[in-house]
Image (tube, helix red, strand yellow):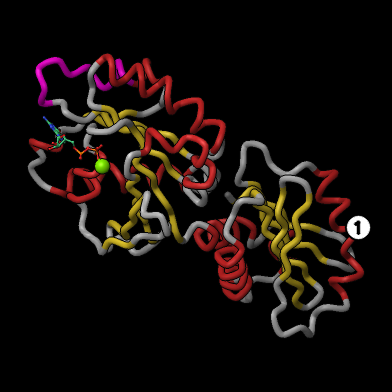
Amino acid sequence: MIRDFFIVNLQTKERFHKSYSKEGTPESIVKSFLLKYTKEFESDEERVNPIKIIAVKQHMFTFLVRSGLLYMIVTDIHDSKKDLEILLLRVTQSLSEFSFEKIRTNSQHEEFEVKITKDLFSQIKIALIGKDNVGKSSIFNQLGGEISYPHSTRVMRSKQILPETTDPTVYLLDYIGTEDFSPQWPNLLRGIHIIFIVVDSTVENVLSTKRLFINLVKKAKPDALLVGIANKQDQPNALDARLIEKMLDIDEVFPLSMHHLTDTKSLESIFIHVVQKYLAQFLVKIA
Ligand SMILES: Nc1nc2c(ncn2[C@@H]2O[C@H](COP(=O)(O)OP(=O)(O)O)[C@@H](O)[C@H]2O)c(=O)[nH]1
Ligand SMILES: [Mg+2]
């Protein structure tokens, strides 16, 4: 997960900083990182592959230097290095039209924040989590898109959903037999931005889902947006989605009946809404 984005003028030490995490990166770690590696940055501009990745404690610094400016993304150490390199290159390229002075002195500040946030979150990954038989795969199958298996052991499959909303690109992940994978969870949830907890709207299922997944997911992905789906609302004993919100202690639970789904658009609109909500938290001032 992206925690912070920095641009630092190596001469004057002036900074642009935007945080994307509840935890953020402690200033002491950023300072000591900069002190320790500043010399190296300055001599490094001519390298063919300018991107470097250095881990400090639980933080991973992905950075490059261009024209005396250090561009740096701070993430968890679990994040994919390849993805981060691509991301940083994309970000620095699309920032060429901005001037560091102007973003520092406010005239381009907001425009710049929107731009980097869109760049940094140009790919959003959503996970469907829950007990067996609640309808996760039904949801996954209903949405269009080509399926790929990103994980060698095939414990999950993924596809790009909402193709017409090209910005950002949205991937949905469906896990197979997820209840048994608890030690692997931090790894399986790598790169995930949004988590849908799916229940079948029965009392037993909601309670055991809470026990099995809620704490685990909050601990593994403290910055992910956690929402719920109360599926099987067509069943006579289905609990109300509002009640499930309270039981699971989740902000938003969407009622759903995959068996009585009239059109895919209504399902898609749930995903569109949640993606917008996720991005909006970083753009409060502009919205
Ligand atoms: N009654 C009812 N059954 C559903 C609904 N959604 C899915 N199911 C059924 O529940 C079973 C399990 O669904 P599946 O998507 O494989 O669940 P998963 O194990 O969570 O991936 C299947 O037989 C589905 O047809 C629903 O909204 N209502
Ligand atoms: Mg399934």
Q: Residue 202: where, in percent of width, then height?
A: 23, 18
Q: Residue 97: where, in percent of width, then height?
A: 61, 75
Q: Amino acid at mark 1?
A: Leu
Q: Can you tell which quarter of the image residue 128 is in?
A: top left
Q: Can you tell which quarter of the image residue 261 is in?
A: top left
User: How busy is the neighbourhood of tag 1: few (under 14 within 10 Å), some, or many (20 plus)?
Assistant: few
Residue 243 belongs to magenta span: yes
Relative side of 24 to 36, left or right: left
Residue at numbered disc 1: 35
Q: Secondary structure at mark 1?
A: helix
Please tell me which residue is depicted at 61% across the width and 73% down the height of the picture.
89
Nearer the observer, 117 or 181: 181
Please tell me which residue is depicted at 54% across the width and 42% down the height of the picture.
186
Q: Give the residues in magenta.
A: 234-244
Q: Residue 231: where, in percent of width, then height?
A: 21, 30
Q: Can you tell which quarter of the image residue 214 is in?
A: top left
Relative side of 30 to 145, left or right: right
Give the vertical position of 249 relative to 162 (above or below).
Answer: above
